[in-house]
């Protein structure tokens, strides 16, 4: 296929990612599993190691210089992330160990005080298990009910169907992905939020995949909660964040107890700290948060936050190239062709199971994901047990997709 010209220097971008420059089974690595975790630029790796080498100390608790420096670095990243998503107050950005913990925090803390028997939680039919199971746990405890709201065969949310459910049931919470990890669908979260609020429901957005591709302005979208993951946005594993509206967070009880989330402790009782400390017990992943700050710096440098910017256009162009390429291969069927989507190419092949596809591609140095992608209800809705998924990032190239197409041709040959 013809390769479109671009002024984006992908070689310069790729040069920042050490892990991309290695061989796997004697082939140059083609990494197409960025929806599972993105590779890390050298600046992120250096930020974490530099903290341990030069500034390692606990935060918030020491009067000595290293502790003060660590605290300053740690809290500066909170401000940086708040600015990145346009949160009105850095104190409404809470550190967690990942997007999953952020969702659990809301489900258990908000849910324990706002859900009652007969209440309804609406979740989209494309949700990740991390935005299903926590709600199932709290719903069972509180006597609430979970209902899915439908999607089209292409992977788009059906807003009229969602509104019909909001009209018909006492809905307290709507949960939805910003970007679907299995299909690449970019959901209209601002429109969903407006609908939910019109019927008195709160909204939690699973932003695990959104941060790297189409960061959300949480103030403009008016979302109640936005859960984030560092490692899917060029940052380290083991770090995430939750944004929540101040009035909601202040009214919620602590999710976990321990040091730093308290104001006073006695045998008679405990009083709790102000935001954000109330939800951050114990020693956090300090080095990971600081490295997350370097990842945000990277995202800002390549101007990915600007949806009209060159990097964003190039990423979309590479996805279009890959879509057309895979659709041109006989026997390959794409799963998920939403009206708006980002860097995911999920597909199935005649006579080849996704796990076999992934294994054969791996021997050619091509890393993809296979299986249900932690979206078993979605796979059932789409009528497939599993898919093969190639997922892209800012460093993905047309040449890598050419390699994927060649690898798929090899699979076709082996399976007749």
Image: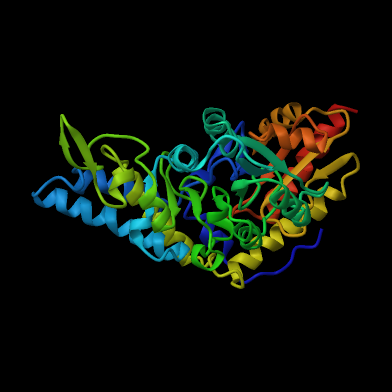
Q: State the residue in front, 394 or 159.
A: 159
Left or right: 51 in relation to 115: left
Q: Residue at x 70, y 41 (%)?
A: 148
Q: Which of 120 and 281 is in front in this view?
A: 120
Residue 41 x %, y %: 45, 52
Residue 156 in picture, x, y percent from top left? 76, 52
Q: In which quarter of the image is the C terminus?
A: top right
Asked if residue 49 is positioned above or below residue 360 in the image, the reply reads below
Decide: is 325 above or below 411.
Answer: below
Q: Where 197 falls versus 48 (above or below)?
A: below
Residue 136 position by quadrant: top right
Q: Is residue 125 visible?
A: no
Q: Which of 308 and 113 is in front in this view?
A: 113
**Residue 192 at least partly seen:** yes
At x 77%, y 51%, the residue is 161
Outermost residue toward the left? 64
Report whether 62 appears left or right of 188. Answer: left
Which residue is found at the position 50% from the left and 65% from the top?
A: 302
Image quarter where the N terminus lies is bottom right
Instruction: Measuring from the top left, give residue 35's x and y in whole percent.
Output: 60, 44
Q: Residue at x 60, y 36 (%)?
A: 132
Q: Where is residue 364 in the image (x, y as percent from the top left)?
A: 68, 35
Tell me which colouring the rendered structure shows: rainbow
- Left or right: residue 320 versus residue 112 is right
Tally of numbered discs: 0
Rendered view: 329 above or below 140:
below
């Amino acid at each position: 296929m013809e390769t479109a010209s671009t002024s984006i220097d992908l070689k310069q971008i790729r040069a920042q990612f050490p892990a991309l420059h290695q061989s796997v089974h004697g082939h140059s690595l083609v990494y197409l599993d960025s929806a599972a975790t993105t590779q890390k630029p050298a600046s992120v790796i250096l930020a974490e190691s530099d903290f341990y080498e030069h500034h390692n100390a606990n935060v918030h608790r020491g009067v000595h210089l290293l502790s003060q420096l660590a605290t300053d670095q740690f809290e500066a990243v909170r401000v940086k992330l708040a600015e990145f998503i346009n949160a009105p107050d850095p104190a409404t950005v809470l550190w967690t160990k990942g997007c999953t913990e952020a969702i659990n925090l809301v489900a258990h803390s908000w849910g324990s005080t706002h859900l009652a028997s007969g209440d309804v939680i609406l979740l989209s039919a494309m949700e990740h298990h991390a935005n299903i199971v926590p709600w199932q746990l709290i719903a069972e405890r509180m006597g609430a009910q979970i209902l899915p709201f439908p999607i089209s065969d292409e992977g788009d949310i059906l807003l009229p169907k969602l509104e019909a459910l909001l009209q018909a049931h006492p809905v307290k919470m709507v949960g939805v992905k910003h970007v679907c990890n299995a299909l690449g669908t970019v959901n209209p979260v601002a429109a969903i939020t407006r609908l939910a609020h019109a019927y008195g429901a709160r909204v939690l957005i699973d932003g695990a995949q959104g941060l790297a591709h189409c960061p959300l302005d949480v103030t403009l979208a008016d979302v109640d909660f936005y859960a984030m993951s560092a490692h899917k946005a060029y940052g380290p594993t083991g770090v995430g964040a939750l944004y929540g509206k101040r009035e909601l967070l202040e009214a919620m009880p602590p999710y976990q107890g321990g040091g730093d989330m308290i104001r006073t402790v006695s045998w008679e009782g405990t009083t709790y700290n102000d935001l954000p400390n109330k939800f951050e017990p114990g020693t956090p992943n300090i080095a990971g948060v600081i490295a997350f700050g370097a990842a945000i710096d990277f995202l800002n440098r390549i101007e990915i936050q600007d949806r009209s910017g060159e990097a964003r256009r190039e990423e979309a162009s590479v996805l279009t190239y890959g879509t057309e390429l895979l659709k041109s291969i006989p026997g390959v069927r794409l799963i998920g062709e939403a009206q708006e989507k980002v860097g995911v190419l999920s597909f199935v092949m005649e006579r080849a199971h996704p796990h076999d596809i992934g294994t054969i591609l791996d021997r050619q140095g091509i890393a993809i994901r296979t299986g249900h992608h932690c979206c078993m209800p979605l796979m059932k809705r789409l009528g497939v047990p599993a898919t093969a998924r190639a997922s892209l990032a800012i460093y993905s190239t047309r040449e890598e997709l050419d390699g994927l197409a060649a690898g798929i041709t090899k699979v076709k040959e082996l399976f007749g």
